[in-house]
Amino acid sequence: MRTRLGLLVLAPMVLGGVASAEAAEGAAAGSWLGPFTVLAAGIGMALAAGLCGLGQGRAIAAALEGMARQPGAAARIQTAMIIGLALIESLAIYTLVIAIILLFANPFK
């Protein structure tokens, strides 16, 4: 745990050094945010995809358990599950849109 925490603390320092080296070479003011937008997009998409996958797995498991306990309500449970899965997946899609905006419409380049 301490190693991971240390890496999280040291990573911005290392990337800050890279960014300041770019600024020293005559880059435009504010360009040090470029590497951080790439990191934010990547980490954000990875977290969103992973957590949405976990949420979808739990939703499907709960729906299957409910269908096994009450087979007569299977159609209603399945409908609610599909709507819930669509809403969960939309969160990952929103994160993808934000990541694409950060990568390609970056005003800090």
Image (cartoon, rainbow, N blue to C red):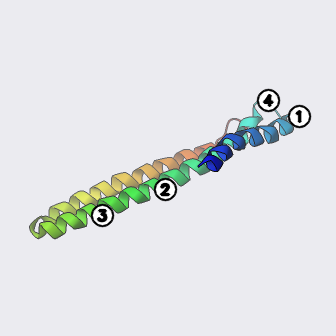
Inter-mark Cα distance, 2 to 4: 34 Å
Mark 3, residues whose alpha carbon is within 10 Å: few (<14), some, or many (≥20)? some
The percent coordinates of residue 105 (x first, y second) are 64, 42
> For mark 2, what is the residue?
49
Q: Residue furthest left?
A: 72
Going by the numbered disc 1, the residue's amino acid type is Ala
Circle number at residue 60: 3
Circle number at residue 24: 1
The residue closer to the viewer here, 12 or 25, is 12
Q: Residue furthest top?
A: 29
Going by the numbered disc 3, the residue's amino acid type is Ile
Q: Earlier in the sequence, mark 1 or mark 2?
A: 1
The percent coordinates of residue 38 (x first, y second) are 66, 47
| Foreground tag (1 vs 3) | 3
Q: Residue at x 34, y 52 (%)?
A: 87
Is the residue 15 above or below the residue 86 in the image? above
Q: Earlier in the sequence, mark 3 or mark 4?
A: 4
The percent coordinates of residue 102 (x first, y second) are 61, 43
Q: Toward which corner of the image does residue 68 lie, by quadrant?
A: bottom left
Mark 4, residues whose alpha carbon is within 10 Å: few (<14), some, or many (≥20)? few
> For mark 4, what is the residue?
29
Circle number at residue 61: none
Q: Residue furthest front?
A: 2
Inter-mark Cα distance, 3 to 4: 49 Å
Q: Earlier in the sequence, mark 1 or mark 3?
A: 1
Inter-mark Cα distance, 1 to 2: 37 Å
Q: Earlier in the sequence, mark 2 or mark 3?
A: 2
Q: Residue at x 82, y 35 (%)?
A: 20
Q: Are marks 4 and 1 in contact (CB under 8 Å)?
A: no
The residue closer to the viewer here, 36 or 6, is 6
